[in-house]
Image (tube, grey):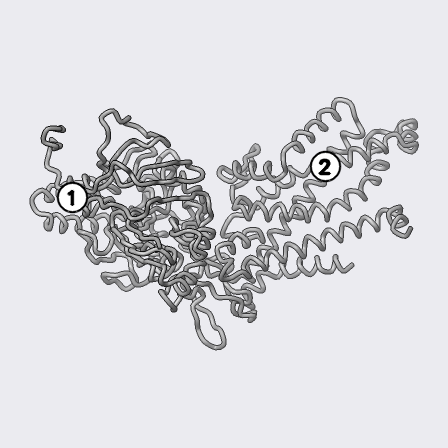
Amino acid sequence: MGDPATGTVTLHLTEPDPELPYKLAVPHASILPKGAPPKDAGTTPIPTTGPYTFASYDPNRALKMVRNPYFKQWSRDAQPEGYPDEIDETFGLTVESEVTAVENGQADWVFDPPPTDRLNEIGTKYASQAHVNPLTAFWYLAMNTNLAPFDNLKARQAVNWAVDRDAVVRQYGGQNLAAPVCTVLPPGFPGHVDTCDYTKGGGSTWKAPDLQKAKQLVQESGTAGAKIGVVVTDDEVNKSIGEYVQSMLNSIGYRATLKPISGNIQFTYIQNTKNKVQISLSSWYQDYPAASDFLDVLLSCASFHPGSDSSINISGFCDKKVDAQMQQALAAERTSMSKANTLWGQVDQAVMEQAPVAPLITPKLIDFTSKRTGNYQFSKQFYMLVSQLWVK
Amino acid sequence: MVSLAVFLLVVLACLLAPVFEHAVAHTDAFTSNISGTTVVDGRRVPVLTPSSTGLGLGVTPIGPTWDLHHYFLGADGQGRDVMARLLFGGRNSLLIGVLSAVIACGAATVLGVAAGYFGGVLDAVLSRLFDVVWAFPVYLLAISLSVVLLTSGLTVGPVHIEGDSLWLPILIIAVIYVPYVARPLRGQVLTLRGRDFIQAGVGNGASDLRILRKDVLPNVMPTVLVFLPLMTALNMLTESALSFLSIGVQPPNASWGTIINDGLGLLYTRPMVTLAPGLMIAVTAVALNLLGDGVRSALDPKARLRGAA
């Protein structure tokens, strides 16, 4: 309910939601005009607040943003005034061209992750222009728990034992750009506990794969020889990891094929059960810093919608016992966040026992900016703050 | 002769791929070896080397060592021996090129001769069919067929061909090139049909089958033989293009086109991954084209006379 007289908005909740401040602080909640359509507005932006306004936008060519003449900074922490007078984004270049453009001073920032064969060059010749930041995210293999062979627990565990997370780290760009993970909650994230159920020799951190154990589990599961399709996006890094996963699956006794598809559709394609995806490479980046944003969102029964493109529980994992644990952790958030995070840590371990996913790496983000830019600022939530860059 | 020798040398090298893989390089050309190591100058080094300078970003596959036992041409992004894959890739590229050329020329001979000899409705139907196939840009048709068949494979009656089978690119390439051979053959048969020796056969009551076997086929076979090496080169190039676009030979299998694709992401750091298969395609295609010219000169006395004049 809005009250123009006092300038306040009152929200009435049906039940307590300790994560509400987070939800209000991120684009999940945006202030919109009363008559805003409850659907995708296409290329005609809906008026909202902010220091910049769209001057022109062609989704195939470019976006030009200029200062919003109506914007007044009311809180520097919440929404600061921007430094550049104009922000131009050009679309359609290859990543190689983007990197070259920044190196030559023809552009100020590369939006996409730099290609792996340019990383060494960026890290040495242009080190002062590279900004590396850890992300609260994880890359993982989602295994369809409702489809053979991964409807078999031992088959899922075999993949977790077999996957060489160091190999994936190398394919992502090396240990300064990614680290191996064993759990759904990334290291340093609320609720994260250092445990590793699937590493050679045991321990709380990942050391090495155990192919012998994986092969044994495949044999015990009776799924050896099964045909498996590995669905990945067709960009260089994802395809390369996919090819490794295919090789790994073949080495433990399956017959895997690689299915690289366009990044424009892969994310929704792997969610829809109608596409009968057995295993896919996916990633999840925090919406806000709460364990539920990973575990509840990705692996609860409520997140599984068979036949829908919007079923973010890609594994189709629905375990009543684990689900009850999640509800318990959500309820605990109302009274004690610390107690809730302990419970979320237990949920994470319970999930990994069932192995619906194989966590691979937690990535870092590299921003490559031009020589003339300054005042680089990074937010864990919004990443590089474009509006805060200085340009000489 | 030189072209034939070069082509045979390439074929021989590719046929020896398993020997090179197991006895020389001691590697597996189809399994990722990302965390593996090898020996260079007596030192054990990782196949994929993480950067240790500056910010330490990126991982670079080992480059050419020029040592046949240890990554002679370096490694690709999966840590696999490029030389071993080059040889295995050549087997597939040549197999697809040769088999699709044989199928295309075989089908074209049957259809082109039938259309030219029997004429009438059969000729009209077959000729329009050729026109329809020919109306599509070759690569567009090949890409469309590949994209559709890759996902589900091809089922004809009781026969099912998997999406990752080599038979798929073989058949697709063969089908799209049938009109390229069939149309000239049809024209040649139309000319032959009016010639005296054919008419004499008809006048003597010889059956169509006998005329086709004894008079028509021996006259069109030299043309088919000339087409074979040329079509092999063309089909090999088409296969490479399809594989480069990831819709030909499927990983972990290799062809020269897939290896070029694998090397795309390494162009700045390890150009050999792309250059080596590119060079092999160029050498083989030139050899086959020269071989085709040679066969034509050998089988067509008039061409030899024209050349002498």
Residue A243 is at least partly visible in this image? no
Chain name for mark 1: A
Mark on residue A30? Answer: none
Q: Report the amino acid beneath label 1.
A: Gln
Q: Quadrant of the C terminus of chain A?
A: bottom left
Residue at image mark 1: A325
Q: Is residue B141 left or right of residue A220?
A: right
Q: Which class describes the residues within 10 Å of circle 2: few (<14), some (14-19), or many (20+)?
A: many
Residue appearing at x 84%, y 33% in the figure: B210
Q: Report the amino acid beneath label 2.
A: Ala
Instruction: Say if labels 1 and 2 share a chain.
Output: no
Q: Which class describes the residues within 10 Å of circle 1: few (<14), some (14-19), or many (20+)?
A: some
Circle 1 sits in a helix, a strand or a loop, which is it?
A: helix
Residue B8 is at least partly visible in this image? yes
Q: Are marks 1 and 2 in contact (CB under 8 Å)?
A: no
Total marks placed: 2
Circle 2 sits in a helix, a strand or a loop, which is it?
A: helix
Tell which of A204 and A43 is nearer to you: A43
Q: Position of residue A217 (x, y in %)?
A: 33, 53
Distance from the alpha carbon under mark 1 to that under mark 2: 68 Å
Q: Position of residue B122 (x, y in %)?
A: 74, 25
Q: Is residue A100 above or below residue A1?
A: below
Chain name for mark 2: B
Q: Position of residue A230 (x, y in %)?
A: 41, 46
Q: Quadrant of the N terminus of chain A?
A: top left
Residue appearing at x 46%, y 69% in the figure: B38
Residue B12 occupies which quadrant of the picture? bottom right
Residue at image mark 2: B108
Outermost residue, bottom side: B42
Residue A74 occupies which quadrant of the picture? top left
Q: Position of residue B262 (x, y in %)?
A: 51, 54
